[in-house]
Image (cartoon, grey):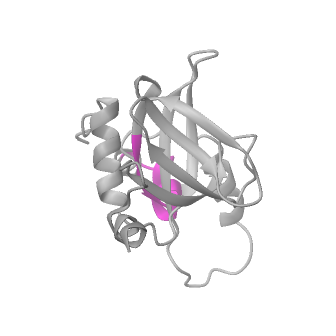
């Protein structure tokens, strides 16, 4: 019963908050589409492949520069207008922009579900460049609490878009 209660709170057995998301882009050692667990540890963010693999990555909170959600529609509009760029909240999309942009021109225009992505921007420890991790938001339970705690630990203030 204790583990089920922790799951509803979005916390592991050590009391660390986590969410499970499918990775879209940003890590070479975890294949696209794999379910990953993002866990807020004391020292930083642990990203670990769930099931059938050992891929993982670790980011110190000092490396994380921004985090947020963005819709597919906002990605399309990002390069088209000032409003679209403002909606993105300053997130660097990395390969996600190319992935979504490439899919947008394929097939008939039909009404479909709205895809929402979770983006984590971080400063590379190797070259200091800002990079992006992209995840698909399915039914991520406790996402708002996770994001709020991650921003607090990383010292990220909410951006005001003008």
Residues rendered magenta in the picture: 67-82
Q: Nearer the viewer, residue 136 or 141?
A: 141
Quadrant housing residue 103: bottom right
Q: Position of residue 68 (x, y in %)?
A: 39, 49
Q: Position of residue 38 (x, y in %)?
A: 51, 49
Q: Nearer the viewer, residue 18 or 69?
A: 18
Q: Is residue 77 magenta?
A: yes
* Rendered residue at 47%/72% (across/down): 139
Q: Is residue 5 magenta?
A: no
Q: Residue furthest bottom?
A: 111
Is residue 118 visible to us here? yes
Q: Position of residue 99 (x, y in %)?
A: 68, 54
Q: Residue furthest top?
A: 127
* Rendered residue at 62%/37% (across/down): 57
When the figure is inspected, residue 62 is found, relative to residue 139, above or below; the finding is above
Q: Nearer the viewer, residue 43 or 27?
A: 43
Q: Is residue 155 left or right of residue 62?
A: left
Q: Quadrant of the C terminus?
A: top left
Q: Residue furthest front?
A: 1
Quadrant housing residue 110: bottom right
* Rendered residue at 43%/38% (across/down): 41
Is residue 93 visible to us here? no
Q: How many marks?
A: 0
Q: Quadrant of the N terminus?
A: bottom left
Q: Is residue 22 left or right of residue 17?
A: right
When the figure is inspected, residue 25 is found, relative to residue 100, above or below; the finding is above
Q: Position of residue 31 (x, y in %)?
A: 76, 52
When the figure is inspected, residue 153 is found, relative to residue 22, above or below; the finding is above
């Amino acid at each position: 019963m204790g583990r089920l209660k922790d799951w509803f709170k979005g916390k592991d057995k050590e009391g660390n908050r986590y969410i499970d998301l499918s990775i879209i882009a940003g890590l070479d050692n975890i294949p696209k589409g794999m379910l990953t667990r993002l866990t807020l540890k004391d020292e930083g963010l642990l990203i670990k492949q769930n099931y059938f693999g050992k891929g993982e990555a670790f980011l110190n909170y000092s490396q994380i520069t921004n985090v947020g959600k963005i819709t597919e529609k906002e990605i399309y509009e990002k390069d088209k207008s000032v409003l679209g760029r403002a909606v993105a909240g300053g997130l660097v999309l990395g390969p996600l922009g190319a992935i979504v942009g490439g899919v947008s021109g394929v097939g008939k225009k039909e009404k479909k579900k709205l895809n929402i992505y979770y983006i984590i921007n971080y400063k590379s420890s190797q070259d200091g460049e800002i990079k992006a991790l992209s995840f698909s938001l399915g039914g991520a339970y406790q996402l708002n609490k996770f994001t709020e705690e991650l921003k607090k630990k990383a010292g990220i203030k909410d951006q005001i878009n003008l």
